[in-house]
Image (cartoon, rainbow, N blue to C red):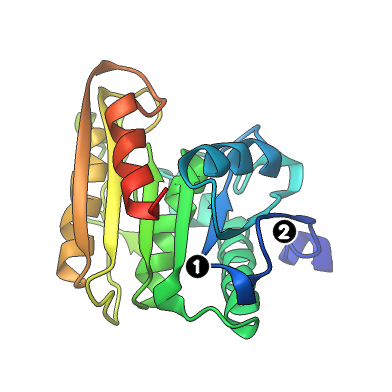
Amino acid sequence: MSAAAADPHGGQPVAAAGPPPAQARLGLVALHGRGASPADILALAAHLAPQGVAARAPAAAGASWWPMSFLEPLEANAPHVESALAAVEARVAALMAEGLPARRIALMGFSQGACLALEHAARAGRRYAGVIAFSGGLVGTGEGEGGPHPELHGRRPKRFDYGGSLGGTPALLSCHERDPHIPLARVRETEATLARLGAAPHLEIISGQGHAPGPRTLGAARELLGG
């Protein structure tokens, strides 16, 4: 396997906005969704927290963090998930090296990027300033028991076997009642898993069908980021 195939997101560009980390009140790792760009998620970050935030937005190879739905078996998206997690960890480590401890670094993502932000937080087991997941859920650590389930868009359950503690990390989750990509059942599982790991999750359920965050959710995100 070539290096690019083993680590598809390695060496991708990283967009930056805001002050240098040493002068920032908060660091932010912002993760775009499928088909979007770092510029898109940085624009949202600037809207939510316009002052004092050192934001970093890595780019996914081909504008997608993994090829299939996050609901598919893990092997369907390997090694993309592992490469994506490494890209997030690299951005967190860089902010920490420039003077921002993890408790002053937040993670934010939309859709596929939200799934990635949540999965990184659960696996890292750190106390972060916050995790904001607009329309996303945990990828999981393995395949669960049981067959395809209608509440999971016809996919099988996953296991969520994470160690460590999130130490009270505030976590904002949002999902429509009927999201074409993100089953509300998975988001509820994510909420419960984060609570078990010691986070302080809050789930905003948006009525009806849709995928984008609503005004109330954006307001809650702005409050979490101190914008």
Q: Label 2 belongs to which residue?
A: 9
**Residue 159 visible (yes or no):** no
Query: Can you say whether 10 is above or below 132 in the image?
Result: below
Query: Can you say whether 122 is above or below 133 in the image?
Result: below
**Residue 10 visible (yes or no):** yes
**Gap between marks 2 and 1, in whole Å?**
28 Å
Element at label 1: loop
Q: Position of residue 76 (x, y in %)?
A: 53, 50
Element at label 2: loop
166 and 72: which is toward the camera = 166
Q: Where is residue 30 in the image (x, y as percent from the top left)?
A: 56, 52
Q: Label 1 belongs to which residue?
A: 25
Horizontally, is 55 left or right of 101 in the view? right
47 and 163: which is toward the camera = 47
Closer mark to the observer between disc 2 and disc 1:
1
Q: Where is residue 61 in the image (x, y as percent from the top left)?
A: 74, 48
Query: Can you say whether 190 is above or below 168 in the image?
Result: above
The three-letter amino acid code for the residue at tag 1 is Arg
- Quadrant of the image containing the N terminus: bottom right
Residue plotted at (21% across, 56% down): 201
Category of crowding for the residue at label 1, using alpha-carbon neighbours closer than 10 angstroms: few (below 14), some (14–19), many (at least 20): some
Horizontally, is 163 left or right of 207 in the view? right
Horizontally, is 139 left or right of 18 in the view? left
161 and 128: which is toward the camera = 128
Residue plotted at (16% across, 63% down): 195
How many numbered badges does the structure rendering display? 2
Category of crowding for the residue at label 2, using alpha-carbon neighbours closer than 10 angstroms: few (below 14), some (14–19), many (at least 20): many
Residue plotted at (55% across, 59% down): 52
Residue plotted at (48% across, 47% down): 49
The three-letter amino acid code for the residue at tag 2 is His
